[in-house]
């Protein structure tokens, strides 16, 4: 499940493999780009922006992609297959080849060509990037508080507030805040909210080069069950108090997501489908 740290790592791999090299072949396998040909142009840089990847190419063109839930980029040498696989050939959306190697994009839900000077038309709505050079915690806090009645988990996931958080970090941050995922963001003290944003930036920064994400105090990923506080740990004991972790749903019904939480460590309001035992 790609989140800001995964996207940062993918962009770095693409940059190291392609930047400074001319494209010798481009193969876009989606209808609206089927005739696009960028061969002969050099890749200038590959940069992440939240969950988006921007591949800037000579001539003022940007290849803009988003990994969504299942997308990925794989890089290979001229003689080798993409490292780590990626998927069957029918899931390939684009192949970009240089003399130094090939980048293959799989299952990309968003792939388009933009004028580099007009990237803001596609990305201008995004909030401060947790892994960006211009991360601004005060601006992220201001945006979060624009809808004080909104559940914390939903506010954290809204990329217009801050860019880079997915469902894993949203669940983990609610646990670290010691409150229900459904607590209105406006009910958090400003001190707690500031600490939460600091924790979010530190967690993504700490994990951006790791293959296995860790949000607990674990120092290695040998015991995968101890790597995360609550995400994906339904019915397993909370690392802090031993209470079984529970799961509820948040967001609108048509695109609801699971919310993982410890009912003892995270007091607060709960919807009917995830009510804490203490509130029944």
Image (tube, helix red, strand yellow):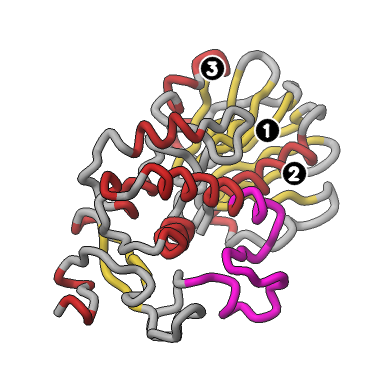
Give the residue pinned by disc 2: 102
What is the count of numbered marks? 3
* Badge 1: residue crowd in 10 Å (few <14, some 14–19, many ≥20): many
Q: Which residues are magenta?
A: 204-229
Image: 250 above or below 154: below
The mark nearer the N terminus, 1 or 3, is 1
**From the viewer's perspective, is 263 left or right of 122?**
left
The mark nearer the N terminus, 1 or 2, is 1
Give the residue pinned by disc 3: 115
Residue ID at (43%, 26%): 122
Q: Is residue 226 magenta?
A: yes
* Residue 191, x across and y down, in percent: 42, 45
* Residue 120, x across and y down, in percent: 47, 20
* Residue 5, x across and y down, in percent: 60, 50
Q: Label 2 near label 1: C-beta < 8 Å?
A: no
Image: 243 above or below 159: below
């Amino acid at each position: 499940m790609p989140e800001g740290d995964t996207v940062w790592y993918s962009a770095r791999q693409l940059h190291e493999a392609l930047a400074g090299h001319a494209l010798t072949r481009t193969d876009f396998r989606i209808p609206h780009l089927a005739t696009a040909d960028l061969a002969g142009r050099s890749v200038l840089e590959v940069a992440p922006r939240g969950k988006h990847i921007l591949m800037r190419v000579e001539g003022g063109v940007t290849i803009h992609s988003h990994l969504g839930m299942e997308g990925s980029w794989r890089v290979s040498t001229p003689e080798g297959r993409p490292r780590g696989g990626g998927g069957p050939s029918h899931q390939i959306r684009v192949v970009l080849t240089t003399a130094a190697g090939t980048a293959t994009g799989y299952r990309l839900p968003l792939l388009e060509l933009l004028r580099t000077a007009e990237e803001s038309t596609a990305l201008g709505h995004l909030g401060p990037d947790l892994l960006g050079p211009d991360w601004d915690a005060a601006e992220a806090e201001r945006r979060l508080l624009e809808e004080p009645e909104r559940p914390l988990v939903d506010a954290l996931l809204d990329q217009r507030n801050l860019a880079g958080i997915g469902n894993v970090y949203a669940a983990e941050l609610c646990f670290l805040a010691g409150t229900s995922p459904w607590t209105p963001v406006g009910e958090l003290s400003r001190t707690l909210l500031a600490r939460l944003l600091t924790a979010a930036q530190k967690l993504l920064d700490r994990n951006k080069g790791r293959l296995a994400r860790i949000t607990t105090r674990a120092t290695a990923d040998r015991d995968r069950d101890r790597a995360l506080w609550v995400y994906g740990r339904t019915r397993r004991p909370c690392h802090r108090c031993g209470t079984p972790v529970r799961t509820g749903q948040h967001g609108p019904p048509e695109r609801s997501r699971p919310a993982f939480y410890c009912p003892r460590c995270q007091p607060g309001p709960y919807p009917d489908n995830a009510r804490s035992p203490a509130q029944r």
